Amino acid sequence: MKGKIPPFYNTPINNSLTNSNLLANSNHFDGFDDLGFTSVWDIPEYLDVPEAPLSKNISRRKIRQYKGFLIDLTASKSVDDYILKQLSARNRKKLRSKKKKLEAENKIEYCFFYGKMERAAYDKLFSQFAALLQKRFDEKRVHNNNLHNWHYYQELVYPLLLKKRASLFVIYNKEQPINIALHFHLEDTVFSYIQTYDIAYSDYNMGDIGMLKRLELFFNIGVKTIDLSMGTTDYKIKWCNYPYHLYFHLFYRKNNLISWSKMITTAYKLRVKQHLRDKDILGKRFRLDKLKYLLKGASSA
């Protein structure tokens, strides 16, 4: 979210669903490594990313990777309109019932921090965020990479929040957060990055209630697309109306054997991994995040 792009692309970079410029005037960062090879990760196919003119000895290989999910609001007149089209009658009824029950049995407040927040309140909330995330992933018995970089995110997000390039959505019961979500903003596109909830409130379907309230907030500020990123889950399938693929772009020097070899090796590894995902082996039958959690538990025993 630093607004820098590799020198292999031109601006503007557009969201093809909304026809809006996400990165109109961005700085470039350095291109090739010492081996004359560079990989650009996780480019969603709904982005129109124009290539810069490449020299004759530079080539690109495009590799399909993860499946991602997005909420496209461009054809919806309101949040109710979107929900009517996206959720089944049973799911709509259940959502209304759970939300009503949550609000009747607790002192609920919905807060959206976007453009303004005191630093002390922000730091306190981010600490609570980490604690809830840890409990949730302990319950799932899954390793969470974000927690190992938590201080980095804490320092990164605050100035972006003040610039309205990031936001935090929180559901409070009294003064205690029970649902927290972090987003990054680019024009009319929101990237939902990290979300969690207090596992003591699992019976209320907090993820669905949080999504409903976030949709209302985002719709009111003119957001057109909400990217829930890579990974297939029942939650994303339920709420998202636009599945897409992410791609890796591999740039290499054609006249450099080391560079070409690096590209071939990387492309092969990526294709094997994606084949295993397509066969529901990697990510379902075998999950690296679960293995990491088990190994961490064994090492600390």
Image (cartoon, helix red, strand yellow):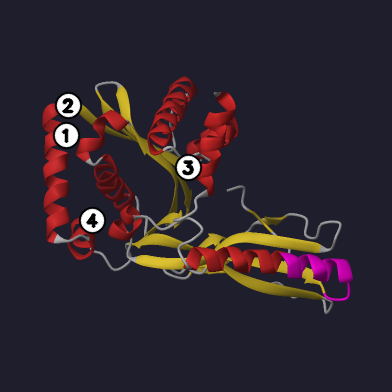
Amino acid on which disc 4 is placed: Val
Residue 79 drawn at (x, y percent): 23, 56
- Please tell me which residue lies in front, 282 or 150: 282
Q: CA distance from mark 2 to mark 4?
A: 25 Å
Name of the residue lying farthest toward the bottom? 56
Q: Residues within 10 Å of mark 3 (few under 14, many from 20)?
A: many
Mark 2 residue element: loop
With respect to residue 266, does 180 lie above or below? above
Is residue 115 located in the magenta-colored stretch of the structure? no
Label 4 or label 1, whichever comes before in sequence order: 4
The amino acid pointed to by label 1 is: Leu
For residue 188, the mark is none
Q: Secondary structure at mark 4?
A: helix
Does dot 1 land on a helix, a strand or a loop? helix
Give the magenta range: 254-265
Q: In front: mark 4 or mark 1? A: 1
Q: Estimate how packed mark 1 is, as few (under 14), some (14 to 19) or many (20 or more) residues with alpha carbons within 10 Å.
A: some
Which numbered disc, 3 or 1, marks the residue that appears first in the sequence? 1
Q: Position of residue 218 (x, y in %)?
A: 33, 50
**Residue occupying the point 46% across, 24% down:** 127
The alpha-carbon separation of the residues under discs 1 and 2 comes to 6 Å
The residue indicated by pointer 2 is 106
- Give the quarter of the image for residue 266: bottom right
Q: Which residue is mark 3?
A: 166
Residue at x 57% of width, y 48% of height: 1
Separation of residues labelled 3 and 1 (CA atoms): 27 Å
Q: Which residue is mark 1?
A: 102
Residue on which disc 4 sits: 79
Q: Position of residue 81 (x, y in %)?
A: 19, 62
Q: Residues within 10 Å of mark 4 (few under 14, many from 20)?
A: some
Where does the C terminus fall, quadrant-wise? top right
